[in-house]
Amino acid sequence: MNKKQVNVISIAFVTIGIISASLIAYDHFANQADRPNLIGRESAEKIAISNGDWNQGMLDDKLLTSKLLHIKNDGFAFLVDPNSLEDKEVFMTKFFELDSNQYVWMITIQNQNNREWNYLIDAKIGNIIKSTNEDFAEFKPINPYESIAKESLITQARGDVTIKFPKGITESKSSPFPAKLVVTVNDTVTWENHDSQIHSVASISHNDSIGKIFDSGILKSESSFSFTFEQTHIGNIDYSCLLHPWETGTIIVQNKN
């Protein structure tokens, strides 16, 4: 091989190297251009703490966790690697109210009794989308016939729960109870009667015995009844208003994880 041939081959290798490097650089910058500009974990946590009016003393005995989620079609979400922004695994909760291709930080503050406060934060602009900074949940009346038709309708409680008999519920012939309410051991459910009519809540066992687990007796207008579920109550507990038998629901008691 003469000198001229060697020079030609050398020039060819150099040219190939330059082209390869250019392609790699182009791909890198193209990916960077497509990469969304998101707020970091620490910023998201500060937003959640500020929204919930938490101070350091309140957080000392609590666990704070942060997850970056990528919302896909129909509310499905993926856990995201905050560094690469790659979708890693399916997140088990669906977010129907969020837009497709949206990135959100989910910040969770949990105490020793597994009570949780959750904050959803738009990872692009840093605003609170949704927060549950109270330690109870309220449920609106539901149509019992619709509940029967949708037996898989399950509401997951996060801590103590208040269920209200709203004014006029008797005349509407509907139920104020979630079709299936999931609680954990040591959670307390409170039923409040804001109707002008009297109501009651009583458990119904599989052998049709009434009030074996809990029985409020007569709930006059603006009165309430509370019951705390214990280890011995784990399982499904059907209950109803004995005065209005269409007002039915089921409480599913689970152990703490």
Image (tube, grey):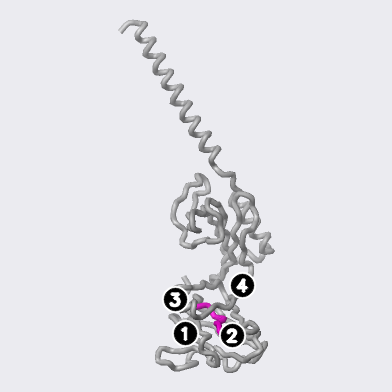
Report which residue position mark 4 lands on. Answer: 135
Nearer to us of marks 1 and 2 is 1
Checking the image for residue 238, the label placed there is 1
- Marked residue nearer the N-terminal end (1 or 2): 2
Q: Residue at x 53, y 85 (%)?
A: 247
Which mark is nearer the camera, 4 or 1? 1
- Distance from Cα at disc 3 to Cα at disc 2: 25 Å
Dot placed on the residue nearer the N-terminal end, 4 or 1: 4
- N-term-proximal mark, 4 vs 2: 4
Predominant SS along the magenta part: loop
Q: Disc 4 marks which amino acid?
A: Asp
Q: Amino acid at mark 2?
A: Ser
CB-based contact (under 8 Å), mark 1 and mark 2: no
- Label count reads 4
Question: Are the residues at dot 3 and dot 4 in contact (C-beta closer than 8 Å)?
Answer: no
Disc 4 to disc 1, C-alpha distance = 24 Å
Seen at 56% across and 44% down, the residue is 36
Q: Which mark is residue 226?
A: 2
- Residue range in magenta is 173-179
- Whole-angstrom CA distance, mark 1 to mark 2, is 16 Å
User: For mark 3, what is the residue?
Assistant: 151
Does the segment drawn in magenta span residue 77? no
Left or right of residue 226, residue 90 in this image: left
10 Å crowding of disc 2: few (<14), some (14-19), many (20+): some
Of circles 3 and 1, which is in front? 3
Q: Amino acid at mark 1?
A: Asp
Identified by mark 3, the residue type is Glu
Q: Label 2's element? A: strand
- Quarter in which the N terminus is drawn: top left
